[in-house]
Amino acid sequence: MAYRRHRPARNWGARLHEITWFGMRAVVLENELLRVTVLADKGGDVAEFCYKPRDMDFVWLAPDGIRNPRDVAGGAGDDVAAFLDHYEGGWQEVLPNGGEPSTYRGAALAQHGEVAGLPWDVEIAADDPSEVAVRLTVRARRMPLRVVKTFRLVSGEAELRVDEELTNESDVALEVMWGHHIVFGAPFLRPGHRIRFPDGATAGPGLAVVPERGAPSDIHYLSGFQDGRYEIIDPDAALGLRVRWDAAVLPDLWLWRELGASREAPWWGRAYVVGLEPFAGRPTEGLAEAVRNGSALALRPRETRPLWLRAAVIEGEEAR
């Protein structure tokens, strides 16, 4: 991303800023209601999703904050640390491996590898008071995959629109795990928050209410989404976030809860979070297992698969 010296400035309506944040290239998309910061130099992560009328950021930041992948940790490196050493919280693209390190057809893939740790190219796709958009592009290094992802804000709307294309750039059929690692925590998340799923989605007992601090950590895999949608709400504040996605592409939802009970690495009792992650492929044992159980996403040679997601703030009666 190059600094565009002669791009007209604007401080009203929908607008867009190119910045350096914690030493990394980033893009800020903003309108009257939302401010969204995307880390171009780290996975295209959403590191801020602030609802301006209430000064409420729905992004959880990990205790050690935003860390530049170029700042290599001094400890021993491994295929788990490759993700966790630079995990700031927020919202990551997960491709082509979900969860534990795995080997697929000779390609060694790290935890949640590999695009979440890569720098992405950035192009301004729209820059008008009525609408702003940025297009991010990345190529994986260990599999012949290309992702193009467009973030868009429309003036007056408290909704982030995300549209993507995943391309198999080879003449070989491939399988991948593909997901969005969306995690909620402070300042938004508290015990008693409600999680609502559409009719038909298989959500077992006890998954609709966020537990108290100190409850056991766990992960669940929800399926049956004809309508890819969930809402996580604070009924007392009448505020929440509605996430929608193309369930034909990402048919499952990973529900990860780390509620402060883990006293060892990497959390040390400091995390109180809930992840609600649309996914193709399960469980969190890596791509080889998803291929074995038939849940991985199949890509034909040279195939391009589109995907859309939406994240919208809801409040008032919608969020009670």
Image (cartoon, rainbow, N blue to C red):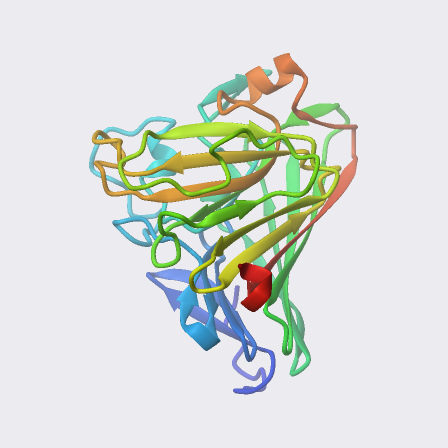
Residue 73: horizontal and vertical position, in percent? 25, 40
Q: Is 8 above or below relative to 162?
A: below
Residue drawn 53% across and 34% down? 254
| Quarter residue 203 falls in | top right
Of 155 and 107, which appears nearest the observer?
155
| Quarter residue 174 falls in | top right
Residue drawn 32% across and 51% down? 67
| Quarter residue 85 falls in | top left
Residue 156 lies left or right of residue 219; in this view the side is right
Residue 79: horizontal and vertical position, in percent? 38, 27
Residue 7: horizontal and vertical position, in percent? 58, 82
Residue 16 lies left or right of residue 147; in this view the side is left
Residue drawn 43% across and 73% down? 54
Of 20 and 285, which appears nearest the observer?
285
Residue 97 appears in the figure: no
Total numbered circles: 0
Residue 222 appears in the figure: yes
Residue extending farthest to the top is: 292
Residue 51 lies left or right of residue 153; in this view the side is left
Residue drawn 63% across and 30% down? 202
Residue 296 lies left or right of residue 98; in this view the side is right
Residue 188: horizontal and vertical position, in percent? 39, 57
